Amino acid sequence: HFATHEQARRRVFSFLEGWYNIRRLHSSIGYCSPLEFENLHAPHQPTSHRGLPTAGQRHGREKRPAARPWTTRCSTPNGG
């Protein structure tokens, strides 16, 4: 039991954010934990000299990547 409501709230928050949410499996990321997901994908993300993501800078590539049908809109000359 906890002495105060605030003490209980802090312990619940600590459990959820410090353990449960980062280790439980999430369906939106292929039923892996956020830690596993980050470990799988983080090494492939380019970083700046400070170790921060580069926000899409393309080093060494002059051409844009090929269009993917799920990310590009089809449009007609009339804008539709």
Image (cartoon, rainbow, N blue to C red):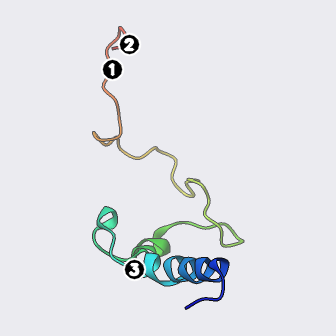
Quarter location, residue 50: bottom right
Asked if marks 1 and 3 touch (Cβ < 8 Å), the reply is: no
The residue lying toward the viewer, choosing from 12 and 78, is: 12
| Element on which disc 3 rests | helix
Asked if marks 1 and 2 touch (Cβ < 8 Å), the reply is: yes
User: Measuring 30% from the left and 25% from the top, which residue is drawn there?
Assistant: 74
Indicate the amino acid at tag 2: Gly
Indicate the amino acid at tag 1: Ser
Mark 1 and mark 2: Cα distance apart in space: 6 Å
Mark 2 crowd level (few <14, some 14–19, many ≥20, 10 Å Cα) = few
Q: Which residue is mark 1?
A: 75
The residue lying toward the viewer, choosing from 3 and 35, is: 3
Mark 1 and mark 3: Cα distance apart in space: 39 Å
Which label lies toward us, 1 or 3? 3
Quarter location, residue 10: bottom right
Asked if marks 2 and 3 touch (Cβ < 8 Å), the reply is: no
x then y, percent, for residue 49: 70, 70
Q: Which residue is mark 3?
A: 36
Nearer-N-terminus badge (2/3): 3
Residue 74 position (above or below residue 33): above
Residue 48 position (above or below residue 55): below
Mark 2 and mark 3: Cα distance apart in space: 43 Å
| Image quarter in which the N terminus is found | bottom right
Looking at the image, the residue that sits furthest to the top is: 78
Looking at the image, the residue that sits furthest to the bottom is: 1
x then y, percent, for residue 28: 32, 62
Q: Which residue is mark 2?
A: 79
| Element on which disc 2 rests | loop
